[in-house]
Amino acid sequence: MLETNRTVEIRPVTTPAERKVFIRVPNAIYADDPNYVAPLEFELASRLDADKNLILKGQKHQLWVAYKDGNPVGRISAIINNAHLARHHDGACHFGFFECINDEDVAKALLDTAAHWAREHGMKKIAGPFNFSVNEEVGLLVDGFDTAPYVMMPHGRRYYQKLVEDLGFTKAIDMYALSYVPHGDMIPPKRKRFLDKAMSKADVTIRNIDMSDFKNEIGRLVDIFNDAWFENWGFVPFTAEQVEHMAKELRPIISPHNIIFCDYQGEPAAFGLVLPDVNYVARDFGGKLLPFNWAKLLWRLKVKPVPRARMPLMGVVRKLHRRPIGTALAYKIIEVAQAANVSRGVVHSELSWILESNESMVSLLLDLGGEIYKTYRIYEKPL
């Protein structure tokens, strides 16, 4: 146990029982926030278990819970992501899962503990939040607190920004979530003419995922993703093991219309992935599936239309970037995905997350009628 002052204690998480405390820390912090959605505890428990989560395989990491007057009042994680370091060579330790009561002493104790651990492991800076990687929940919410988060997107309290910045953390980059409400023709007439012209002579095939070849199809999706996102800030490619794990995780909630592929000149060139908003479905579960919420979850996902959907991943291979056909494929993917979801009762979509530096994609989504309604920030601090 690391005692940081006379009233705040930081305790490392080492047992399943302590992980359960870690998972439930936010419940009290968000008790008065109607927009908070507790994550499903069984899913989060698996992600925090190094024996079950491939992201943690071979990675040094640690979880901590903060206690004040004997009560859990905050939490944090730290991880040395070898894949990130191999690609970016920035000496960064990543913190994540940050939750805290509005108390400067608690915030300082948590972030100082993570920073001290990072220094002990030879790191040069600490950055985050990453839960646990750039391909999972990322960023501290700094704008857009008045709506509930979509699936696999973090929530936050307004005071977090001040707590973190007062401790010397500075902005590394922002990420946007865009809201989209279906309205008539999605593509403006001027863009429609451009799209039709670019596609008219192109050898393009648009199709949905082949569920009978699901594992290989997810592999194709990830191949496009790893190429399309290669030059993006913080990018870390998916490994073969992670692809197999992703296929298993996605299969129960994916229908053919959720994944669209575009082939160009006979080769995979673009894709879009849409997820039903599980947060909306499980908003009243309090994070628990037992004893009866299993049945409710399946019924709400498979029988009753889910009115919200999120597009977390989309990509066009790099060789088509800045070419008319590449832009046209991006427009077409979003148009096809949106039409399929609207026909199934979706009335609101989120397109997230988009790096602020990805100006072409932000412009495209705004052009389609999207609206930036949430901003997430990655912070960093030298050690």
Image (cartoon, rainbow, N blue to C red):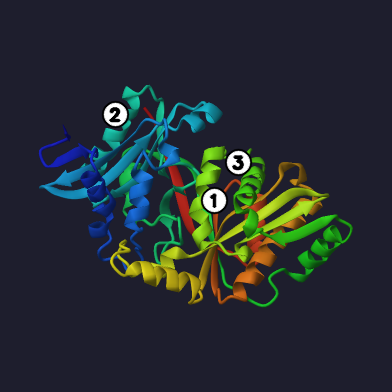
Q: Quadrant of the C terminus?
A: top left
Q: Which residue is mark 2?
A: 116
In depth, the one of 350 and 370 nearer the eye is 350
Q: Is residue 135 above or below residue 197?
A: above
Amino acid under label 3?
A: Asn
Q: Residues within 10 Å of mark 1 (few under 14, many from 20)?
A: some
Residue at figure coordinates x 50%, y 33% from the top left: 84
Q: Is 291 placed left or right of 331 in the picture?
A: left
Distance CA(mark 3)–CA(mark 2): 29 Å
Name which of mark 3 and mark 2 comes first in the sequence: 2
Distance CA(mark 1)–CA(mark 2): 37 Å
| Residue 264 percent coordinates (x, y) | 80, 51
Q: Secondary structure at mark 3?
A: loop
In depth, the one of 21 and 175 nearer the eye is 21
Residue at figure coordinates x 32%, y 67% from the top left: 285
Residue 326 visible in the picture:
yes
Q: Which residue is mark 3?
A: 232
Q: Which residue is mark 1?
A: 247
Amino acid under label 2?
A: His
In depth, the one of 148 and 17 nearer the eye is 17
Residue at figure coordinates x 33%, y 49% from the top left: 45
